[in-house]
Amino acid sequence: HLHRNKRFKAYGALGLVSIAVIATVVVVVVTKKLKEKYASKEVFYVTPVPKQSPTMAPTMERDLSGVREFLEKNVLVRNATYDNTEVGVVNGTIGNATIGDGNSTPWNKSKSVTTFADLKVGDPRLIALDWILHKDVKQLEVYDENLSQRYILGLLAMAWDSESWDHCGAVVENTTEVEEVDTTLSEDSGTCFLRDNETDPVQTFQRWLSDADECDWFGVACNDGHVISIELAQNNLIGEIVPELGMLPFLQIIDLSSNCI
């Protein structure tokens, strides 16, 4: 019996060791399989970097300023285009002012214009709108009292080819313009100096489309900030009388004689 007990104990111990070894191997194998299975599915949680809201471009801000809509409502003359198809006429009187000798000036009434979107590319009213919105250093808003009149004067400069004027027109970009007239002493980007002859005193004027107040532009006179007179005789103006000129409520005098208007 003693011998049998010893053999039983030996086999029992061997069985326990075998079970332990087998269990260890199983655990190792299962663990390895699990790691291989989920290794490609590991999820890493990274705190995202906060994104800053993009800053709106300056031109877009100006386009959304309401200036365009304000000018459409208060300045843009309806049913007027600058084409040369069906021609209508503008009377020799605009607002309270008489134009030159009172002769009528042709312009087109063939299309119904209610917004700037109705105008063709190259229309002076669109060019002036782009200037007042994006290029004019004043950057006027709808609450500025002189927004309408500055736009209208800018429109005149665009419609009458101010870069080709004999005196104090807009400076051509990227060039050094020298007026070939004996009345000009010197000039810079915004100022021109004129005198009738060498014995007369020098007069200083601000160029059209310059950064200066529009009331200081050459040939423009104002009263209490309102344009009352535009005198640009013999200045090589080329173009047509723009209907929006009649939207200057205080304008009394217009002298465009000896020009191609």
Image: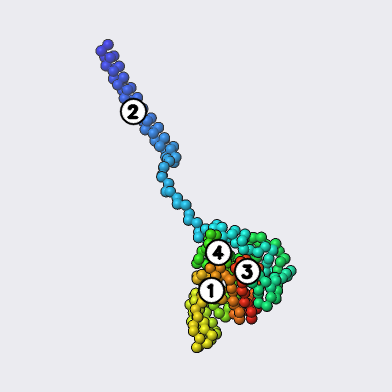
Whether tag 3 and tag 1 are in contact, CB under 8 A, the answer is: no
Q: Residue at x 53, y 73 (%)?
A: 217
Q: Is mark 1 on a helix, strand or loop?
A: loop
- Residue placed most toward the observer, 38 or 31: 38
Kind of residue indicated by mark 2: Val
Whether residue 178 is situated above or below residue 84 in the rendered picture: below
Q: As drawn, which residue projects farthest toward the right? A: 86
Mark 1 — residue?
Answer: 217
Corner quadrant of residue 221 = bottom right
Give the CA separation, mark 4 to mark 2: 94 Å
Lower position in the chain sequence, tag 4 or tag 2:
2
Mark 2 — residue?
Answer: 21
Give the CA separation, mark 4 to mark 3: 14 Å
Give the CA separation, mark 3 to mark 1: 16 Å
User: What is the x, y in percent for residue 224?
Assistant: 53, 68
Kind of residue indicated by mark 1: Trp
Mark 3 — residue?
Answer: 245
Seen in the image, is 2 located left or right of residue 180? left
Q: Residue at x 56, y 60 (%)?
A: 67
Give the CA separation, mark 1 to mark 4: 15 Å
- Residue placed most toward the observer, 58 or 187: 187
Whether tag 2 and tag 3 are in contact, CB under 8 A, the answer is: no
Kind of residue indicated by mark 4: Leu
User: Which numbered mark, 2 or 1, is in the foreground of this view?
Assistant: 1
Q: What element carries label 2?
A: helix
Whether tag 4 and tag 2 are in contact, CB under 8 A, the answer is: no
Give the CA separation, mark 2 to mark 1: 103 Å
Mark 4 — residue?
Answer: 147
